[in-house]
Image: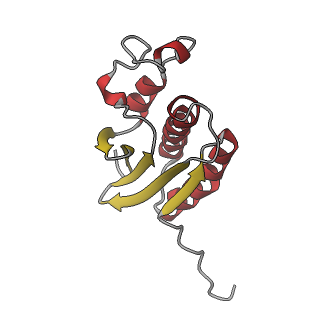
Amino acid sequence: MSGETAAKPEPRLTLQSRLEDIALLWPWVESIAEEHAAQAATRYAIHLCLEEALSNIVRHGYGGQPGRPITVQFSSAPGELVFTVEDQTPPFDPLAFPGDAAGLPAPFADQIPLGGHGIGLMRRFAGSLSYTLLPHGNRLALRFRIGRT
């Protein structure tokens, strides 16, 4: 070994609104999780929540329209990893809904009845969620505990 160290992961990942781009999350999240010694269960929770959030943005927020931006920003605080997802879709606060399709505004309600459990999954697997309405989009922050439980 020549004393090389692994490159530190970039704190920001920019994706396009295509379901295929979600695959770019996996190596990025894994490099972050490795750097912070996140447990397997935490890695699973991060992947599950981010995939759910991004697929909802692509399918429902952007209505499948390709080429629209989605950014995922990473930061850390003592004992936690924070992933912040931003889009430029119409306003949608996922925390204002019970975690199923009931009460969702159009166009979301007619697209979610087959499943509609993504918000509930995110609430269950993330340590905490917070939402911010942006001037031209939305921001969802997902926090995951690392270290001792």
Q: Quadrant of residue 18?
A: top right
At a point 41% along the width and 23% down the height, the residue shown is 120
Image location (x, y in percent) of residue 65:
62, 37
Q: Tell me: residue 116, above or below residue 128.
A: above
Give the answer, above or below, for where 73 lies relative to 123: below
Model colouring: secondary structure
In the picture, measured across the screen, residue 64 lies left or right of residue 93, that is: right
Q: Quadrant of residue 127?
A: top left
> In the rendered view, would you say 59 is above or below 113?
below
Q: Nearer the viewer, residue 22 or 15?
A: 15
Task: Residue at 34% x, 18% y: name it.
Answer: 98
For the C terminus, give its image quadrant.
top left
Q: Position of residue 44 (x, y in %)?
A: 54, 41
Residue at 47% x, 64% y: name it: 11
Q: How many numbered dots are placed on residues in this image? A: 0
- The relative height of residue 129 versus residue 86 in the rendered view (above or below) is above
Percent of width and height locating residue 108: 47, 20
Q: In the figure, residue 30 lies in which quadrant? A: bottom right
Relative to 128, 120 lies left or right: right
Left or right of 54 in this view: 100: left
**122 or 144: nearer the viewer:** 122
For the point 51% across and 56% down, the residue is 33
Report the residue that reaches farthest toward the bottom.
Answer: 2
Which quarter shows the N terminus?
bottom right
